[in-house]
Image (cartoon, coloured by chain):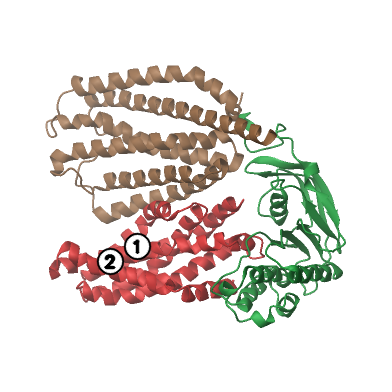
Amino acid sequence: MRWLSFRSEAARAVTLTVRNLTIARGGLPVLSGLSFLLEPGQAMILRGPNGAGKTTLLRTLAGLQPPLAGEVSGADDTIAYAGHADGLKAMLSVSENLRFWADVFGQQRLDAALDAYRLRELEHRLAGTLSAGQKRRLGLSRLLVTGRPIWMLDEPTVSLDKDAVAMFAAAVKAHLGQGGSALIATHIDLGIEAETLDVGAYKADPNALSGASDEAFL
Amino acid sequence: MKALLKRDLMLALRAGGGFGLGLAFFLIVTVLVPFSVGPDPVLLTSIAPGVLWLGALLSCLLSLDRLLALDFEDGTLDLLATAPLPLEAALSVKALAHWLTTGLPLVVAAPVLGLMLNLAPAGYGWLVASLAVGTPALSVIGCFGAALTVGVKRGGLLMSLLVLPLYVPTLIFGAEAARRGAEGLDAMTPLILLAGLTSATIALMPFASAAVLRMTLR
Amino acid sequence: MSLWEYANPVKFLALSARVQPVLWVASGLCISVGLIWGFFGTPDDFRQGSTVKIIYLHVPSALMAINAWFMMLVTSLIWLIRRHHVSALAAKAAAPVGLIMTLIALVTGAIWGQPMWGTWWAWDPRLTSFLILFLFYLGYIALWEAIEDPDTAADLTSILCLVGSVFAILSRYAVRFWNQGLHQGTSIPVATGGRTVSDVFFYPLVISMIGFGLLFLALVLYRTCTEIRVRRTRALLAREGQGA
């Protein structure tokens, strides 16, 4: 059964527009007044200290939590999100894991994903027997089977060695070349031409209430 | 949707104890009953339908906390929430997978266990029918309970406390059907009521479960 | 002046401070009058002796047990639709009160039934339904305690209250079916409230019921105010932690 199967195989070119966004974590506003554009072919790196709100921003844009204020357009069904956890099932093989996500997102071919991260020789290994780096490569390859144009990645290079980081950077470059875009929270220099967005500049004033969930009590 | 069903079934089969655990528990409970009430065949005959229903219900309960907690921990739920599949459909499929791997085997095993409890000959058909009609309801209601406690550490006990009172109508109608059938009376009324209950819960509970899950993932 | 004004926690606290003393005094009066009149001022029933007087505790508490759940249902809906925190906290506050009312109803019901049935507990449909309600209350309270984020807890418990209400009604019919069959009448006299009881019992009963109702209101207001203050302290501490 294919839900919303109007999607075509090629990546659609979509611009993500964020206007005056305020986001919250645990009910308290953490970033406010954030505005930016992410155009097709563009990559943006999120920088900021730990706890600044990078993860919260990515989750909000991906649709997992609602923002407190502001607008996001171009985000319906266009975003592929990769967080800290890989979403892999240990008892399924590499190709079975990928096949599942491909089916869920309505895509057919696993080749691009397997080749980009050199997973072919691991194709039939159970995901539980992979090393941390291999698991992360599998988790990242999942993005390639979603067929979605905008990638949102939260610290993607954790547990990757130099070679694997190079694989990842190459995959991102290829994705951008096809008209896709990427928003990546990372401390590492990936060697990709990208704008930087420092979320520290948008830190929400803790005393400004701006629609925080416990605003009514103060 | 088919992909999700296939995956859940595969996982249940491979994750050693998926199928077998519920059945083993059902067997153990059945075996313990004569030890607790005495081996008098007449007594066993009169309590057999109820005890078998209770055993089936408790076995269903056992395997519920794995339904969503595992997916929550490895990040799969987050990813499913951003997928094109509606969360309601995903949860219905998961409940179906639960029934196929837990409820259905119980239905098949019940007559065999009925032998051990000296179930009246007329009761076998009604027992199987009532379990077949009632166990799907147990799966969907259980899915709701699992969704409520998915983020809670050691939520198994809390889930039982929430789910068991919700099981009462199903247990009453199901056990009543089995009991009346065993006594040779007409058991159509409770069976039809049970069928109505199961249909309603299958149709409506996924909406409640999905709403709850979205709130938790926020 | 709309009732929604009191969705503002500060205004609610102010209103509650004015109203509570009146409620406590009024409920104390009504309950004392109702119980004393009921226990000492009315004759013994020719059939049930003096244990029937437990009706002055049993009926009001049973009524409140159900009303509490109904109030929780309404306030849960208000939270889900209009996101008024006071509403969610009122539901949280009402739950333990409802739990205790249910417990009182169960215990007094058992005491009432003992001379008639010969046992301290019987699976009478009415009592059984209250037992199930007791379990629902327990689950609801447990869920509030188990979830860390207060807004998520409010959301989840609201849905539980909704779903639980549907199943509670279903259970009531299922239990009647289970014990009495669909077409038999009740053979055991159960608490039916004031109408089938003769006048001399009626007035103390009504006063007692009003007293319990006022007590319920007073308790819920008191507990809601405490919950509001707890949330306020949390909010202030959170701001401090973030600002530093």
Q: Chain of mark 2?
A: B
Three-letter code, disc 1: Leu
The residue indicated by pointer 2 is B29
Three-letter code, disc 2: Val
For residue C40, which quarter of the picture? top left
Choose the circle earlier in sequence order: 1 or 2. 2
| Chain in red (letter) | B
The residue indicated by pointer 1 is B58
| Chain in brown (letter) | C
Mark number displayed over residue C115: none
Q: Report if residue C228 is visible in the image.
A: yes
Number of numbered tags placed on the structure image:
2
| Chain in green (letter) | A
Quarter containing the C terminus of chain A: top right
- Horizontally, residue C13 falls left or right of residue C176, namely right
For residue A136, which quarter of the picture? bottom right
Give residue B127's position: percent from left, percent from top.
30, 71
Residue in the foreground of this view, choosing between C94 and A115: A115
Q: Is residue B130 above or below residue C33?
A: below
Give residue C75's position: percent from left, percent from top.
51, 38
